[in-house]
């Protein structure tokens, strides 16, 4: 028999009425609305200065307008992002990108005051309009399927009323009218798999925890996002924290827990602040504490700030950290769902997993299964970075190919360069070549290709990249982040890194390739946790798909991507160098650039540290600085003797 949630519905209806009244008052106010993305990506691009410019100019010109802070739209390449809704102008809400303080002042005067939207600065309209293309017409928008990120960039993350007015917490109210086993059955039927990397079925994990008899249980949100280049969890917490908290509450109700912890990185100050605000508002609205919405369900959430250890993203290492011990994974079984934090049954889910729960409860398991693939239902969120035109966050249905994601959705490779590789899955993933770009993005297909879904980080590399150096970079990361418990991981990754460093400095040996393969297999077999078992993936996939790069480094002492400093050199082409131009001289940190007898420039290779600043500084019309690999290809130019300056008396 299902519980009676009549009182919960009545309290929720009252919250909805108050929230919708506030939204209506905001939307119907006869003044322009300026929506500014204020997540970390926007702030890092200058959104605070942009907001200040709008505020100052509005005050100076006596214009009445509402400035509305929202989270991240996912289009990080376009930050600072501003949407201006100016109904009196006759135009729909207009989407502007890269809004600097100067552009903010210009739009205030010309659009808000004079009604001219300045089409040359418009990225698109948010609704259909004959004069302005809609943002949904761009592939960066129309090929996404937003479930977790649906409200990101639409609501103020520090306003619970805006979340409720958009339908937030309705799934929790629905949950309170169902038996816990019904919720578990729904999540199990949906086929949702953990979005933290391993892809374990979420419903099965909840079912095991619910079956354990215990006086107290606990649920944990794992927001310890540590992959280089990954920022999906951070952005969700900064842009829509209440959806994560709602998913956490539903999880606790389903498994019989009364307490939850959000384990979040202390390096995410904005996410932590937003979370604390969200928790305070949820308590004030009766959504946390004793008797949630007047029901028998008691629930409380605490925040724990981690100290940035990558291995604490592994659930048993996370539990050790919460208990005040050194974050080191432990043997399983028992699994955390049986015996976790302080011996209590503990369910640990990722941010994206928990944020997927409310839509599934509200719309049903069949709806969720209709998205994605049979074995990987739903959507995947990726942070796409590197050599790609439209970097940022993307939420796509499972099954979309890597080619579609990189080229159709994210705009392909900038500067018309050729694609070389994509690193997917972070340090635990692998480098995949162009031949595998048609691989569907789902848990099983990526594993078959030698990579893995991971937490959702994707690094795109163009033809000028060096996969050997990329493998070295990720090995350096995992080796430093190893907790040291396993001999294979602690010492094996050190040996792998030593070999890769030798190869990238031109000291590689013929036997190194075989040694890399053997060591990788041993580390994978002998390590306890996922960090060690997958640490060698970047090495194995780069060896498998890019053997010619290793051959060039070892046999020819050459870096095809000209990224390994020891295997390249800079020189100046005297045929194109301009007489008297000292641009390169001014930026050289070691005074390695000298003037020849013809007043052109040369590079003293003994002093050059190969920083590349001279190439950046050289005017495009001359394009005189070259870099080559191996170093022996550079022409030799003798530095003329420079008379010694007389010492001052």
Image (cartoon, helix red, strand yellow):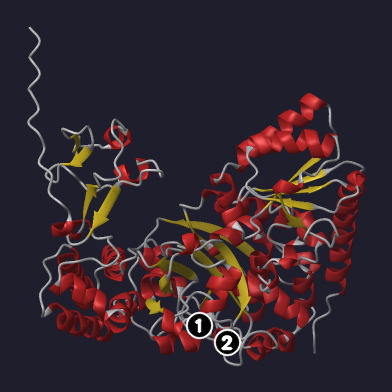
Q: Which residue is mark 1?
A: 199
State the residue in front, 486 or 81.
Answer: 81
x, y percentage for residue 447?
A: 43, 86
Q: Is residue 80 left or right of residue 487?
A: right
The answer to which quarter of the image holds residue 607 is top left
* The N terminus sits in image quarter: bottom right
Q: Please tell me whether residue 624 is drawn above or below residue 13 in the rendered image.
A: above
Residue at the spot 30% in from the left edge and 79% down from the top edge = 546
Q: Is residue 223 among the parts visible in the rendering?
A: no
x, y percentage for residue 458?
A: 47, 69
Q: Is residue 604 among the parts visible in the rendering?
A: yes
Residue at the spot 51% in from the left edge and 84% down from the top edge = 438
Residue at the spot 77% in from the left edge and 36% down from the top edge = 108
The answer to which quarter of the image holds residue 586 is top left
**Is label 1 in contact with label 2 (beta carbons under 8 Å)?**
yes
Q: In terms of secondary structure, where does tag 2 sit?
A: loop
Q: Earlier in the sequence, mark 1 or mark 2?
A: 1
The alpha-carbon separation of the residues under discs 1 and 2 comes to 9 Å
Tell me if mark 2 has few (under 14), some (14-19) or many (20+) residues whose alpha carbon lies within 10 angstroms of its own.
many
State the residue in front, 209 or 430.
Answer: 430
Q: Which residue is mark 2?
A: 376
Q: Is residue 521 left or right of residue 642?
A: right
Q: In terms of secondary structure, where does tag 1 sit?
A: loop
């Amino acid at each position: 028999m299902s519980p009676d949630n009549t009182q919960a519905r009545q309290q929720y209806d009252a919250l909805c009425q108050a929230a919708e009244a506030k939204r209506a008052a905001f939307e119907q106010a006869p003044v322009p609305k300026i929506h500014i993305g204020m997540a970390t990506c926007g702030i890092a691009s200058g959104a605070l200065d942009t907001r200040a410019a709008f505020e100052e100019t509005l005050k100076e010109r006596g214009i009445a307008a509402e400035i509305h802070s929202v989270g991240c739209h996912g289009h990080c390449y376009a930050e600072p992002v501003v949407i201006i809704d100016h109904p009196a102008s006759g135009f729909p809400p207009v989407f502007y990108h890269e809004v600097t303080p100067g552009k903010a002042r210009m739009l205030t005067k010309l659009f808000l005051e004079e009604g001219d939207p300045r089409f040359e600065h418009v990225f698109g309209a948010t609704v259909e309009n004959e004069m302005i293309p809609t943002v949904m017409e761009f592939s960066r928008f129309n090929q996404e399927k937003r479930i977790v990120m649906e409200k990101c960039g639409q609501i103020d993350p520090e306003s619970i009323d805006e979340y409720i007015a958009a339908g937030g917490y309705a799934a929790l109210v629905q949950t309170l009218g169902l038996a816990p086993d019904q919720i578990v059955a729904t999540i199990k039927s949906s086929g949702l798999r953990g979005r933290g990397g391993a892809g374990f079925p979420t419903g099965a994990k909840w079912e095991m925890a619910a079956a354990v008899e215990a006086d107290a249980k606990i649920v944990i949100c794992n927001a310890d996002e540590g992959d280089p280049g990954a920022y999906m969890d951070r952005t969700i917490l900064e842009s829509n924290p209440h959806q994560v908290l709602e998913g956490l509450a539903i999880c606790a109700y389903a498994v019989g827990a009364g307490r939850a912890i959000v384990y979040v990185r202390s390096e995410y100050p904005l996410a932590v602040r937003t979370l604390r605000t969200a928790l305070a508002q949820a308590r004030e609205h009766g959504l946390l504490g004793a008797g949630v919405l007047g029901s028998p369900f008691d629930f409380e959430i605490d925040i724990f700030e981690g100290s940035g250890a990558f291995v604490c993203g592994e659930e048993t290492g996370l539990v050790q950290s919460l208990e005040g011990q050194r974050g080191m994974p432990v043997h399983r079984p028992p699994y955390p769902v049986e015996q976790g934090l302080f011996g209590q049954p503990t369910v640990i889910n990722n941010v994206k997993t928990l944020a997927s729960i409310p839509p599934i409860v509200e719309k049903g398991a069949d709806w969720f299964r209709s998205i994605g693939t049979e074995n990987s239902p739903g959507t995947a969120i990726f942070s796409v970075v590197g050599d790609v035109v439209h970097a940022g966050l993307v939420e796509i249905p499972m099954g979309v190919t890597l080619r579609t994601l990189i080229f159709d959705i994210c705009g392909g490779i900038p500067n018309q360069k050729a694609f070389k590789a994509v690193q997917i899955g972070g340090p635990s993933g692998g480098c995949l070549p162009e031949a595998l770009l048609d691989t569907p993005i789902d848990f099983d297909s990526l594993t078959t290709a030698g990579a893995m879904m991971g937490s959702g980080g994707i690094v795109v590399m163009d033809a000028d990249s060096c996969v050997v150096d990329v493998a070295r970079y990720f090995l350096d990361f995992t080796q430093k982040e190893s907790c040291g418990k396993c001999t294979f991981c602690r010492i094996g990754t050190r040996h792998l890194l030593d070999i890769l460093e030798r190869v990238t400095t031109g000291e590689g040996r013929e036997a190194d390739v075989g040694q890399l393969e053997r060591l990788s297999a041993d580390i994978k077999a002998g390590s306890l946790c996922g960090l060690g078992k997958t640490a060698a993936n970047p090495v194995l996939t780069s060896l498998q798909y890019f053997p010619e790069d290793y051959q060039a480094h070892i046999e020819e002492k050459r870096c095809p991507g000209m990224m390994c400093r020891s295997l390249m050199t800079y020189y100046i082409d005297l045929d194109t160098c301009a007489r008297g131009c000292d641009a390169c001289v001014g930026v050289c940190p070691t005074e390695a650039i000298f003037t020849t007898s013809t007043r052109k420039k040369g590079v003293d290779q003994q002093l050059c540290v190969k920083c590349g600043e001279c190439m950046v500084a050289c005017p495009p019309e001359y394009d005189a600085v070259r870099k080559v690999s191996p170093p022996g290809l550079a022409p030799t130019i003798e530095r003329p003797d420079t008379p010694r300056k007389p010492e001052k008396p």
